[in-house]
Image (spheres, helix red, strand yellow):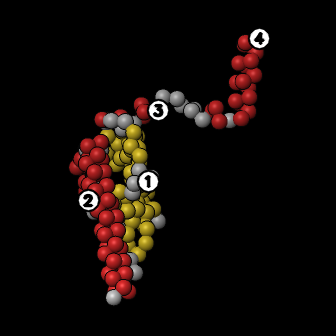
Amino acid sequence: MTKTFKNISFLIIFTLFVSGCSLVRDTYQIEQRIVLDYLLEDLPLPDDAEILKVPTVILGTGNRIAGRVIMDSPISPAENLIFYGNNTVSSGWTLIQSTVGDEIILTYAKNGRYATIELVQRGIGFFSGLSTSQIIVSIVHPESIGDQNPYLALNPKQAKEDLDQAIASIE
């Protein structure tokens, strides 16, 4: 009786844990879609792609948005290429560059903004034999960069020269 009770308890706890994780993931996807639909209202994103939480970052608002959205897609890079080919131009984006190979890279422009879409094969389903892909969308506005060389201070030689100049100006 005790062993049966433990087994049933384990199954109930395991089921609740798994369903809870799924609910959190689904809630995150719904909330992220709302935010991305607002911030990237004119850049189409496939409905069936799952947004990855950790590497995705969006900065700014309106037309001066910059950031990166990374998604896993259940369809192949070729099918995603067709999706973007059909949907971005109709959203007012202009294709300015494309590279098709092992990776597919598309660069679009609209109202001074640039969007680069990378489509990479992630794997092939074991049972289905169908290809899946990862979609990396990077969007920038040229005016979102103020300092053209923000990493200059990371150069140790330059940092020493700047420090020496600062000390000389104090003396």
Labels 3, 1: front one: 1
- Label pair 4/3, CB-CB below 8 angstroms: no
Residue 145 got which mark? 3
Provide residue 104's location: percent of width, then percent of height: 42, 60
- Residue ID at (64%, 32%): 153
At label 3, which amino acid type do we have?
Answer: Ile
**Residue for badge 1:** 54
Residues under numbered marks 2 and 1 in contact, where contact means CB atoms less than 8 Å apart: no
The amino acid type of the residue labelled 4 equals Glu
Q: Nearer the viewer, residue 64 or 84?
A: 64
Q: Which residue is mark 2?
A: 47
Identity, as a three-letter code, of the amino acid under mark 2? Asp
- Amino acid marked by disc 1: Val
- Marks 2 and 4 sit apart, C-alpha to C-alpha, by 64 Å
The Cα atoms of the two marked residues, 3 and 2, are separated by 31 Å
Q: How many residues crowd mark 4 within 10 Å: few (<14), some (14–19), many (20+)?
A: few
Q: Earlier in the sequence, mark 3 or mark 1?
A: 1
Q: Residue 27 in the image: x percent, y percent?
A: 28, 56
Marks 2 and 1, the one that precedes in the sequence: 2
Where does label 4 land, which residue? 171
Element class at badge 4: loop
Q: Tell me which numbered mark, 2 or 4, is placed earlier along the sequence.
A: 2
Q: Quadrant of residue 11?
A: bottom left
Q: Quadrant of residue 118?
A: bottom left
